[in-house]
Image: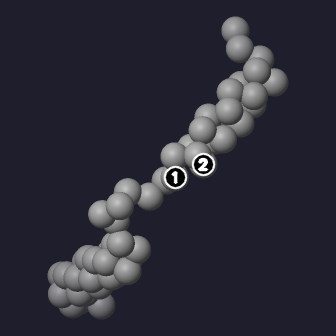
Amino acid sequence: MMNLHSAAAQLVTLAAEGEERGGNHDSLNPLVTGGGALIVLLLLLWITTRFNRDR
């Protein structure tokens, strides 16, 4: 059974390897991703309010 210290050491190693490679894909633009998410959430809010007219 793995103890807490060895689990923490493995997580630190994994995090350090992730920093070297970088977490962002070249095709992911933060403005497009955030704008798309905002549009989807506003659309869901609009749909929810259309179905909830009795309040």
Position in image of residue 40 (x %, y %): 26, 77
Position in image of residue 16 (x %, y %): 66, 41
> What is the distance, in whole Å, between disc 1 and disc 2 at their CAs?
5 Å
Res. 42 image quadrant: bottom left
Q: Who is closer to the viewer here, 2 or 16?
A: 16
- Measuring 60% from the left and 38% from the top, which residue is drawn there? 17
Horizontally, residue 55 falls left or right of residue 7, namely left
Q: Who is closer to the viewer here, 12 or 39?
A: 12
Circle on res. 2? none
Give SS at disc 1: loop
Res. 37 image quadrant: bottom left
Circle on res. 22? 1
Position in image of residue 44 (x %, y %): 25, 77
Q: What's the amino acid at mark 2? A: Glu
* Residue of label 2: 19
Q: Quadrant of the N terminus?
A: top right
Q: Can residue 45 be seen in this view?
A: no
Is residue 37 placed above or below 50 in the rendered structure? above
Q: Can residue 10 be seen in this view?
A: yes
CB atoms at circles 1 and 2 under 8 Å apart? yes
Position in image of residue 4 (x %, y %): 78, 24
